[in-house]
Amino acid sequence: MHSPTLELVFLGTGTSAGVPMIGCDCAVCRSDDPRDQRTRPSALVRYPSRPSASGEADAEPRQLLIDTTPDMRLQAVRERINRIDGVLYTHAHADHIFGIDDLRRFNAVMQQPVDIYGEPGLLETLHHMFGYIFQSHRNVNPSFVAELIPSPLHVGHAIDLFGAAWTPIRLMHGRLPILGFRIDWAGRSLAYCTDVSTIPPESYPCLEGLDVLVIDALRYRHHPTHMTVEQALDVIDQVEPGEAYFTHMAHDIRHADLAAALPSGVFAAYDGLRVALEARRGVERLAADEHR
């Protein structure tokens, strides 16, 4: 019998422009390595929910989505995702929120609303940008829009989602304060930190004792709002997770070249990669085409 598993699925590992980029003829954008084809950054976290009073956990694992990218429909179809138990938002940039309309399909499939979570300012931005969803009574024509239930998040205050503790972590995306997330479940822990250029000193305690750290590593050259590969490696050296994975990678990075140069325990993620944390077996990487 398999032990309960916390699984992280990399839905997208690219930048806001994706890879290949429109109008680019560089070697990475022309690469035939599928790991160099990166959709916009997002992840799915799935795990069995807390057992009920009878000792039985839900047969279906809970599935929590981090951000709704413009590629969300393609990502969900590719990974055969048919339910979402909640969406947690890191920040309100277009490449992280513009797929919100596609949540309506989960409403239809599940026959229930979808809970969404974000900082109060982000939720206000969503209400303003997507008025046709949040103020549907004002639409000229009745239409099929997402049914969403917003709840605020506050830095450092963990929320319990189906037996896992999700702790919002303050990160800086250039001068913009955004969120990362630490997830603790059944003695296992991972943190997802995308679009980050610096980590405030007070946030480092939230990155202690991790089994898995996912961190932004945009490119080799300096960028004002994202970490470079070298900066990400410095953070990994400081927090010492069991394993670390790079995400939000630009077309400056060829997957095979970076993967060959990384130290032990550090990996370049790619779309479709799955990382499993099992109670008795530790960390297990699953190739993108497994379980398809």
Image (cartoon, rainbow, N blue to C red):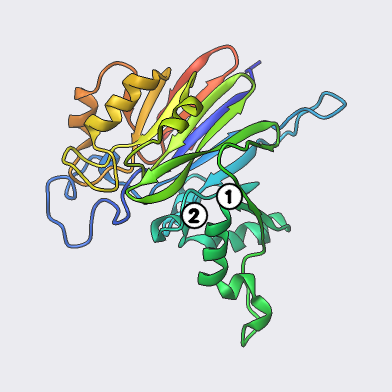
SS class, disc 2: loop
Q: How far apart are marks 2 and 1 (CA)?
A: 8 Å
Position of residue 264 measured from the top left corner of the image (x, y, whole percent):
29, 16
Q: Residue 213 carries which label?
A: none
Mark yes or no: residue 288 visible. Answer: no
- Within 10 angstroms of label 1, few (less than 14), some, or many (20 or more) residues? many
Image coordinates for residue 147, horizontal then vertical, percent: 67, 64
Along the line of sight, the residue nearer the viewer: 158 or 290: 158
Residue marked by disc 2: 68
Q: Name the residue under label 1.
A: 87
Crowd band around label 2 with a 10 angstrom C-alpha radius: few (<14), some (14–19), many (20+): many
Amino acid on which disc 2 is placed: Thr
Q: Do the residues labelled 2 and 1 touch (CB within 8 Å)?
A: yes
Name which residue lies at 24% across and 33% down. 229
Looking at the picture, how far across and down is residue 166, in whole percent?
Answer: 60, 36
Find residue 136 and report its image quarter.
Answer: bottom right
Give the residue type at disc 1: Val
Q: Could one spot residue 72 in this view of the protein?
A: yes
Q: Give the residue at x 40% y 30%.
A: 287
Q: Is residue 137 above or below residue 271?
A: below
Could you tell whether 143 is left or right of 219 in the image? Answer: right
* The residue positioned farthest toward the front in the image shown: 202
Q: Which of marks 2 and 1 is nearer the N terminus?
A: 2
Residue drawn at x 59%, y 27% is 184
Q: Quadrant of the N terminus?
A: top right
Query: How many marks on residues?
Result: 2
- In which quadrant of the rendered view does residue 5 lie? top right
Question: Image height check: is 51 above or below 198?
Answer: above
Between 203 and 221, the one nearer to me in the picture? 203
Q: What element carries label 1?
A: strand
Residue 191 on image: x %, y %: 48, 31
Lateral position of residue 10 relative to residue 130, left or right: left
